[in-house]
Structures are given as structure tokens and as C-alpha cells.
Image (cartoon, grey):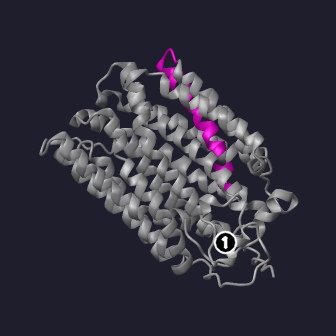
């Protein structure tokens, strides 16, 4: 028979603030690093496309480890996995600072520095991925269905706020004395993450989540898999596959634009990497503020459903990329990037909340793990966009626009995306999605 999930108890504000802080610190450090990467690469002598490739191995490890960490959070609890993720992030940032410092002092060739930079960043992909599914599952378990879109958009707002603060702080952390220079931001972000780790350890209560016990379930759309004692991997689950496809394409476009932006501004202004750093930070902050406006303002003001977010998000992002592609001035670049970020700020909560609502309560961590994998593996494609930029500066942004328009059509045509609604029981296609399966599976 069907087992009904317990009604979630509202998440205390203090607990949400701590979870928000975990996401904020990670986003702040990552976007702060992205903002200084063009200057780091060109100062050390690493080719532009390899600078974007610094995140590739980390992204693959993130995608591969996220499902494992999602299952581990079901087994050991949400809080311990947040601690693992923060530790991995802090250690990775500290290692990156050491490697960048060595490169700036020319202690090894640029390619050797790149290799060590890749490995230092990989620590984040392997261990930092632990916190993401844990934080999403923690929030989902304490949020009623009708409030989940707002809760998820608020949590996504931590990423948006981090992308404002990170690029703003990064230039301030470039320490000219002691020979630290461009390694300073990563060193400081590591210390901030360690401080957040102590806050989680001391102040965050463990989630009320308990390991799911196998129970008899009603027949599902995947009865053969259930009969065999296995669950369909999340990336093959028809309830989630459309959201994962949509999310992957959106994440590819947002990452590609973000990692190409710094090179575009340096070349547009004709300045040295260090001189252009402030202009890069300003552009990224405008984009981040636009993303926050979407997640904290527009979504709440108009009470937008996942279905609306999935459509409006990619439409607005397509317009922004068109402006960036054919910008005449630096101001136009900033405006186009802000409009794109506004669109991505709408689209991301759309597929995150939609995927959360498409599955049962005990599958929240696995669904979050699948989304985290999508958000990680897309980074592997960023070097290809930078290579494309080196050939034709407008090309990556034109490609982004085309991909966003394709997702707009997909959002209208696909039944799962077209029926994404905050009350899945009212939709025939989503009603099936609330049937829970009996066993925990893997991606």
C-alpha cells in the first residue's frame, strides 16, 4: 500500500539561516575565484581555455560523487554531510592558494602549475559536493509542499548573494605585500569556510530525517525495476529526466557565459588583467544583483510557479546573451550580463523546485544529488566555449541564445515541464510522481 510521508514541520529561521550560510560561503568562494581566474591565468601564462578547464576535473568528480553523498546523507544524516562538504571546500581553497602563489613566483612552469591547480580544485569536486544534496534535503524535509518553491528560491538566493559578495570581496583580498597577491582571495575564503564549519557543528540541529525503511508500495510506472529489487537511476527516471535535461542546458549556458565574461572585458577594455579586475568584479556584481532580484523579488512578488519560471527564465536569458554577443560598449556588456543573470535566476529555482515536487519525500536527497550532478558536470564544457570565443568573440553568446530558445520550446512542449506546478496532486502527470518507491537506488 501507499505510505504517506509525514507532514513537514516548518524550518526554524535560525536553522535556515545556517543552511543559507553554508550555500552562501561556497558560492562566495567559487564566484570570487572565477572573477580572478582570468587575471591569474594571464599573469602565470596559462592559456585561456585551460584556465576555464581548471574546473573540469572538479566538475566530473562533483557529478560522480554527488549521488554517493546524497545516499550518505540518507544514511548518516544531513548535518554530518554539510561538515564534510565545508571541510572539502576549505582544504581545496587553501591548496589552490598555495599553488597560485607558487605560480606567481614562477617556482614551476605554467603547465606544471596548471596540473597542480587542477588537482587542488579537484578536492572540492570530490568532497565539497557532500553539502549540496544535504542542504536541499534538509530544507525540503521541513517545508510544506505549497511553500517549497519559495523555500527553494530562497536557498538558491544564497548562491545569488554569494555571487554578489564573492566578486566584490575578491579584489579586496588581493594582498600586495608578503608576495601573496592573487592567491589572497582563496586563502581568505578558506578561512571563512572554516568559520562556517564551526557554526554548523555547534549550532545546527540535526534533521528529523530517519533512514527510509522498505515498505510495500503501489505499482508504479517502473514496476519491472521494483520487482527486480532495484530503482530506476534518477537520471533515467521519467519524472525527473526532463528537469535534468533542462537544468543541464541552463547550467552549461550560465557557466559558459560567466567564465567567458572576464576574458571579454579584458579584451574589450584593452587593459592588463590586473587593471581590468575591478571592471570584471563590477560586471559580475550587476549580474548577481539581477539574479537576486529574480529569486528574492520577482518570484515572490508574482508568486511564480515552476512552470512559469521554466519559461520566463530561458526567454529572458536568451535576450541577455543576444545583447552581450553584439555589445558596442562595456556598459552594454554589463547590461546584457545582468539581463542574462536575471533569466538564469528565474530558471534555476524553476527546475530545482520542479524536480523536488516531482518525487516523494524520501527521494529528496537523491533528486538533489541528481540536480547537483547536472550542475557539476556542465562545467566540463566551459573550455570549449572559451576556445570558441578565441575564434569569434560573439560566438559563445550567440550559441547560448540559441540553446536558451530551444529550452523555451522544450518548456512548452514537454508534458512534465508544462505541468510543473506547486501542487503536483492536481496534475494528472504529476500525480504519478508522488508514488514513492520502496528501495534506495543509485544514479
Judge whether residue 29 can be spotted in this image: yes
Q: Picture coordinates of residue 294 (x, y %)?
A: 66, 42
Q: As rendered, which of 42 and 273 lies closer to the eye?
A: 42
Region of the chain picked out in magenta, as a range: 327-353
Q: Which residue carries the number 1 mark?
A: 225
- Quadrant position of the C terminus in the picture: bottom right
Label 1 sits on a secondary structure element that is: helix
Identify the residue shown where x is 63% and y is 46%. 246
Identify the residue shown where x is 45% and y is 56%. 26
Judge whether residue 14 can be spotted in this image: no
Q: As rendered, which of 290 and 52 lies closer to the eye?
A: 52
**In which image quadrant can residue 297 be found?**
top right
Magenta residues: mostly which secondary structure? Answer: helix
Please, is residue 298 above or below residue 391 in the view? below
Instruction: Determine whether, in the image, residue 157 is placed left or right of residue 31.
Output: right
Q: Picture coordinates of residue 75 (x, y %)?
A: 54, 80
Instruction: Determine whether, in the image, residue 80 is placed left or right of residue 290.
Output: left
Q: Residues within 10 Å of mark 1 (few under 14, many from 20)?
A: some
**In which image quadrant can residue 2 be found?**
bottom right
Identify the residue shown where x is 55% and y is 25%. 398
Q: Picture coordinates of residue 171 (x, y %)?
A: 35, 40
Q: As rendered, which of 279 and 58 lies closer to the eye?
A: 58
Query: Of all residues shown, which one is farthest toward the left?
Result: 107
| Residue 343 on the magenta segment | yes
Circle count: 1
Instruction: Determine whether, in the image, residue 420 is placed left or right of residue 232.
Output: right
Q: Picture coordinates of residue 201 (x, y %)?
A: 46, 75
Instruction: Determine whether, in the image, residue 335 is placed left or right of residue 256.
Output: right
| Residue 421 on the magenta segment | no
Identify the residue shown where x is 54% and y is 50%. 159
Please, is residue 212 above or below residue 342 in the view? below
- Quadrant position of the N terminus in the picture: bottom right
Amino acid at each position: 500500500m501507499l505510505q504517506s510521508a509525514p507532514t513537514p514541520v516548518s524550518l526554524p529561521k535560525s536553522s535556515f539561516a545556517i543552511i543559507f550560510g553554508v550555500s552562501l560561503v561556497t558560492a562566495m568562494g567559487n564566484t570570487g575565484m572565477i572573477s580572478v581566474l582570468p587575471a591569474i591565468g594571464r599573469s602565470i601564462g596559462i592559456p585561456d581555455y585551460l584556465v576555464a578547464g581548471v574546473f573540469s576535473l572538479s566538475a566530473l568528480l562533483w557529478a560522480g560523487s554527488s549521488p554517493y553523498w546524497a545516499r550518505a546523507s540518507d544514511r548518516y544524516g544531513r548535518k554530518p554531510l554539510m561538515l564534510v562538504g565545508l571541510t572539502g571546500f576549505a582544504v581545496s581553497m587553501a591548496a589552490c592558494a598555495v599553488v597560485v602563489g607558487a605560480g606567481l613566483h614562477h617556482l614551476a612552469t605554467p603547465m606544471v602549475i596548471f596540473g597542480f591547480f587542477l588537482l587542488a580544485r579537484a578536492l572540492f569536486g570530490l568532497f565539497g559536493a557532500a553539502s549540496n544534496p544535504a542542504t536541499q534535503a534538509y530544507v525540503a524535509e521541513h517545508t510544506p509542499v505549497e511553500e517549497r518553491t519559495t523555500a527553494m528560491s530562497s536557498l538558491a538566493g544564497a548562491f545569488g548573494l554569494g555571487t554578489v559578495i564573492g566578486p566584490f570581496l575578491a579584489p579586496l583580498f588581493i594582498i600586495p605585500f608578503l608576495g601573496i597577491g592573487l592567491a589572497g582571495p582563496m586563502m581568505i575564503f578558506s578561512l571563512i569556510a572554516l568559520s562556517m564549519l564551526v557554526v554548523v557543528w555547534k549550532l545546527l540541529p540535526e534533521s528529523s530525517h530517519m533512514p527510509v525503511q522498505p515498505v510495500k508500495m503501489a505499482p508504479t510506472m517502473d514496476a519491472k525495476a521494483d520487482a527486480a529489487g532495484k530503482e530506476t537511476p534518477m537520471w533515467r527516471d521519467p519524472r525527473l529526466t526532463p528537469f535534468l535535461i533542462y537544468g543541464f542546458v541552463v547550467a552549461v549556458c550560465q557557466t559558459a557565459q560567466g567564465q567567458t565574461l572576464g576574458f571579454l572585458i579584458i579584451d574589450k577594455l584593452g587593459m592588463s588583467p590586473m587593471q581590468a579586475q575591478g571592471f570584471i568584479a563590477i560586471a559580475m556584481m550587476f549580474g548577481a544583483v539581477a539574479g537576486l532580484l529574480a529569486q528574492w523579488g520577482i518570484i515572490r512578488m508574482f508568486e511564480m510557479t515552476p512552470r512559469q519560471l521554466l519559461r520566463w527564465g530561458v526567454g529572458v536569458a536568451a535576450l541577455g546573451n543576444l545583447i552581450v554577443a553584439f555589445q558596442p560598449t562595456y556598459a552594454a556588456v554589463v547590461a546584457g550580463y545582468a539581463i542574462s543573470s536575471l533569466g538564469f535566476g528565474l530558471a534555476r529555482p524553476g527546475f530545482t523546485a520542479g524536480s523536488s515536487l516531482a518525487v516523494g519525500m524520501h527521494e529528496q536527497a537523491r533528486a538533489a544529488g541528481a540536480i547537483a550532478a547536472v550542475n557539476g558536470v556542465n562545467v566540463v564544457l566551459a573550455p570549449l566555449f572559451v576556445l570558441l570565443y578565441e575564434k569569434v568573440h560573439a560566438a559563445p553568446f550567440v550559441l547560448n541564445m540559441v540553446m536558451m530558445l530551444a529550452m523555451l520550446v522544450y518548456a512548452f512542449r514537454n508534458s512534465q515541464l508544462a505541468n510543473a506546478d506547486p501542487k503536483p496532486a492536481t496534475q494528472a502527470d504529476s500525480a504519478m510522481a508522488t508514488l514513492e518507491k520502496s528501495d534506495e537506488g543509485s544514479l
